[in-house]
Amino acid sequence: MNNSLIFNELSLVTSIEKSLPIHGGYLLSGSKLSISLPYKPHQFYRHGWQSWSLTTWVDITCKIPPLKPNVLHPMQTDPGYVFSENHNGSWVGAVDTQNGHVVLLGALGLEAHVELDGQILKGWYETGTGDWFVACGPEQAVLARYAGLLGERFGHGHITEQPRVWCTWYSLFTEIYEGQLLNIFKELGVLPFDIFQIDDGWQKGIGDWDPNEKFPSGMDGIATKIRLLGRIPGLWMAPLLVVPSSNIFFQHPDWLLRNEQGQCVSAGFNWGEPLFALDTTHPEVLDWLTLLMKKVRTWGYDYLKLDFLYAGALPGKRHNGMPRETAYRHGLKVIRAALGDAYILTCGAPILPSLGLCDGLRVGPDVASYWDGFRDSHLLNNLSAPGVQNAIRTTVNRLWLSSLVHTDPDVVYFRTHNNNLLTEQKQLLQDLVQVTGYKATSDPPSWLNADERNALNNFLETKPKVERTGRYTFHINGRAVDFSPAMPIHDPLNLPLRVVGFFLGWITNAHWVLRLNDWLGRKLVAPVIKDTKR
Ligand code: 9PG
């Protein structure tokens, strides 16, 4: 029943008998596939499930402990695989070869997972069977070929120009108000932004997508004013999420994704509340999504940041029994149809099932005005937590997706005001954004000095020549740039800190602790943004 795949530098024995040689590798088909490696690899490419999930090359000997607290698993990683002992990843994985190339195993369908078990690379589909691509060769060539095959099956984004976005989140968070935003939009003056995007904070509730009292002219009103300033209005939503305090949760309990026992599936915890997901196979949910998307289009928004989308692909028992990622993709298709030719940026989104249906895709965790958060990244092992290091690490390791979709690395910072990033850290993030070409910032003009404003203007106006020279190295207009400083994964903690981490991980499962954390976060933001509320 075994079969050999012959490459220039090695032969691989696989468990599936039939294989089709294609340009750059082999195609195989089956629900399970294992590949025996004739040597012991040193590194494994772990590909995270959704935008925020850790994606990186790791040394085989490096243990990546499950992130904490458990209540956040559904919102940061694929919850079904958190406790796997082996290095594993969503849809695709790779190992190094003895002469510096890679062996890649990549699924060409949904609901697929891979892992490295000793010297065996394994892949499986959670339901049914599907196709696999196996390749061996130089890393970038192999990933490019895999991306090409994904493009044939899932399609590409349809908008060619990358937008330049001013986004409210990374300075104002949820403390946004109509008057304050209009002031900022005016102060942005002639800075060459295409999109003014309103992020989280405008809505009545998660699930109740109407403007709250902070937007008295309505979302159509502010969109009209953005147009008068010559920019395209953009809006954030988390359309597949609901929270218990929303009207929709109360009115349509039958729309929620449930497990086999009939309990609502947890989609994590945020905004001081537990999160739940809509079942995107329920016909009434699909009708509601269509009306919602048409509504925001009539309000005047041509750029939609659709966030927390993983909720639609969590494991559960769906209305029509569809597998989870297929169900999510079905929902996203309905959303795409209702939004027509608007620009869709997906965020917190499962990667493969979003391809072809979005124009931009967030490919890393959130940035923040600091490099690395000790509590989250170290004590809680959470490498999906906000921070520039986590964001750069995962984004750089996902750049191969750039031939399929605009890869969004999140915003850059030019400000020194309210910012703990060192000059070289800000520069590294700016360099990454030059590599992807997806340019966004949240710096309010009043937080920038004249030099910083000029630098931002230049950054938005120029398109430098980018050449890749290695896994983590580039030339940007001839200048050597190295993203390696963002790659290290911290060493295991010493015993006392492990104890602290264990306790913190345990206590932060409690809703009241998370609520307190959320409240504290908002208290800390309020004084910082006071000066924008003129
Ligand atoms: C708005 C924000 C911004 C941001 C998004 C997303 O894992 N987490 O707890 C987690 C919470 C929020 C988050 C990412 C991860 O941020 O990425 O750009 O739109 O929502 O609430």
Image (cartoon, grey):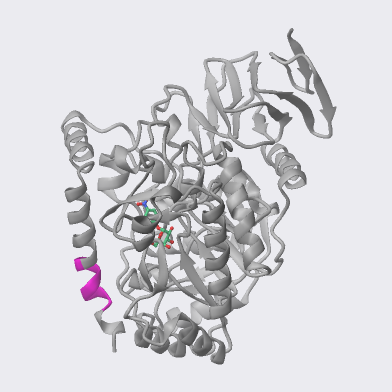
Q: Is residue 523 above or below residue 505?
A: below
- Whereabouts is ligand 1, in terms of quadrant? bottom left
Q: Nearer the viewer, residue 14 or 81?
A: 81
Residue 203 location in percent, x, y? 38, 71
Q: Is residue 210 above or below residue 473?
A: below
Residue 2 location in percent, x, y? 73, 9
Q: Nearer the viewer, residue 413 or 233?
A: 233
Q: Residue at x 43, y 23 (%)?
A: 61
Decide whether the magenta segment is chiefly helix, strand or loop. helix
User: Is residue 205 toward the left or the right of residue 236 in the image?
Assistant: left
Number of numbered tags placed on the structure image: 0
Which corner quadrant holds the N terminus?
A: top right
Residue 364 location in percent, x, y? 49, 51
User: Is residue 385 toward the left or the right of residue 57 in the image?
Assistant: left
Q: Quadrant of residue 379?
A: top left
Q: Residue furthest top?
A: 1
User: Is residue 58 toward the left or the right of residue 520 in the image?
Assistant: right
Residue 407 location in percent, x, y? 59, 56
Q: Can residue 281 be found in the magenta stretch?
A: no
Asked whether the viewer can see residue 176, the reply is yes
User: Is residue 70 toward the left or the right of residue 289 in the image?
Assistant: left
Q: Is residue 17 above or below residue 157?
A: above
Asked whether the viewer can see residue 472, the reply is no
Which corner quadrant holds the C terminus?
A: bottom left
Q: Which portion, as a residue range, is magenta?
A: 523-529
Q: Can residue 528 be found in the magenta stretch?
A: yes
Q: Residue at x 19, y 35 (%)?
A: 497
Q: Residue at x 79, y 23 (%)?
A: 8
Q: Residue at x 53, y 79 (%)?
A: 299
